[in-house]
Each structure stands twice: as structure tokens, then as C-alpha cells.
């Protein structure tokens, strides 16, 4: 397995995984938003958003996106792992774990305090992995649409 930073040349590798991620969460986004997301991930001048792709024999099998940001509890930044997806055919091969570890490595390299993420309460498969690689903080996530 090879894990690489997402770059502009990876759009055609990234897009099917992104589409699979959206299908998994039963949502859709416009082509314009999808392109904008990808462009921001690749733009090193745009904040601290980035991502990685996992390949096996040249086939893209997983993606992860992150955002590095300030926080109020430390003088160090933190890393939010926003999206993680592994192609259905590749699940159970350690790709999700490898992508999480790659983000953690990047966070350490950039002097972050920690990596955190969330998942849907019904996503028991993901939770089985997350319980092995991180701790459940017991915090709930709330959202107010504006």
C-alpha cells in the first residue's frame, strides 16, 4: 500500500472515492461544491486543509481529509480528521487504519496537540476500528444550521 498527499493531478483517483463517501452518507453535493472541496484540499495557500489517498497497485482504495486549526486549550494546533472513506472492496485490509495513522503522523510533524474526529452513531464498523486506534472522549456533537 502507498499513501500519498492529495495533489491536483489526483482528481480522477479521488472523485470515485469521494462519490462513494457521499453515497455511504446518503447525501449529494453539486459538481461545483465537489470541485471546490478538491481544490481547497490541494491548495497549500488555503488554510490548513489537506488529505491523503491510499493506493494498492496503482488503484485508489481510500481517502482521508484533515483540517489543522487553533484551539483554546493549548498553544498548539489540533487536527480534525474530517472525512475517511475506504472503497467497499478494500475494507478489512487495514487501509482506514493506515490513513488515520498517516494523518496522526502529519499532525505530529506539524506539532499538533492531537487528532480528533467523529462518526455517525450507527456506523458500528468504523467504531470498531476507532475504538482500537483512539479513545472515545464521551463528548457529543451538536450542530446548529444557519
Image: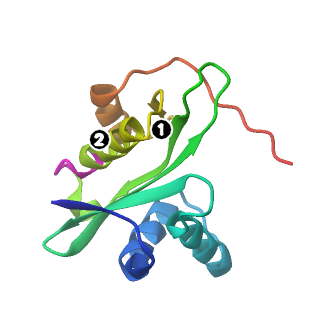
Looking at the image, is 28 positioned above or below residue 126? below
How far from the left and from the top, in percent, is residue 110? 43, 40
Foreground residue among 54 and 129: 54
How far from the left and from the top, in percent, is residue 44? 53, 63
Foreground residue among 65 and 89: 65
Query: Is residue 108 in view?
Result: yes
First of labels 2, 1 by sequence position:
2
Q: Is residue 135 magenta?
A: no
Residue placed at 47% from the left, 71% from the top?
19
Looking at the image, is 9 positioned above or below residue 34? below
The secondary structure making up most of the magenta span is loop
Mark 2 to mark 1 CA distance (whole Å): 23 Å
Image quarter where the N terminus lies is bottom left
Return the residue at label 2. Answer: 101
Foreground residue among 113 and 21: 113
Q: Quadrant of residue 54?
A: bottom left
Mark 2 Cα within 10 Å, few/some/many (few <14, many 20+)?
some
Foreground residue among 45 and 13: 45
Side of 79 where 17 appears, left or right: left
Residue placed at 73% from the left, 38% from the top?
143
How far from the left and from the top, in percent, is residue 105? 32, 40
Q: Is residue 93 magenta?
A: yes
Image mark for residue 122: 1
Side of 112 where 39 appears, left or right: right
Circles 2 and 1: CB atoms closer than 8 Å: no
**Element carrying mark 1:** loop
Range covered by the magenta-colored residues: 92-96
Image mark for residue 110: none
Amino acid at each position: 500500500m502507498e499513501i500519498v498527499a492529495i495533489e491536483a493531478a489526483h482528481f480522477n483517483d479521488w472523485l470515485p472515492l469521494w462519490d462513494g463517501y457521499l453515497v455511504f452518507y446518503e447525501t449529494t453535493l453539486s459538481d461545483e461544491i465537489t470541485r471546490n472541496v478538491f481544490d481547497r484540499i490541494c491548495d497549500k495557500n488555503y488554510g490548513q486543509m489537506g488529505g491523503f489517498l491510499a493506493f494498492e497497485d496503482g488503484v485508489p482504495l481510500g481517502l482521508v481529509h484533515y483540517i489543522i486549526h487553533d484551539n483554546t486549550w493549548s498553544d498548539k494546533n489540533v487536527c480534525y480528521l474530517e472525512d475517511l472513506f475506504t472503497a467497499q472492496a478494500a475494507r478489512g485490509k487495514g487501509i482506514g487504519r493506515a490513513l488515520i495513522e498517516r494523518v496522526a503522523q502529519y499532525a505530529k510533524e506539524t506539532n499538533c496537540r492531537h487528532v480528533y474526529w467523529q462518526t455517525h452513531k450507527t456506523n458500528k464498523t468504523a467504531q470498531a476500528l476507532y475504538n482500537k486506534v483512539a479513545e472515545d472522549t464521551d463528548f457529543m456533537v451538536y450542530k446548529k444550521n444557519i
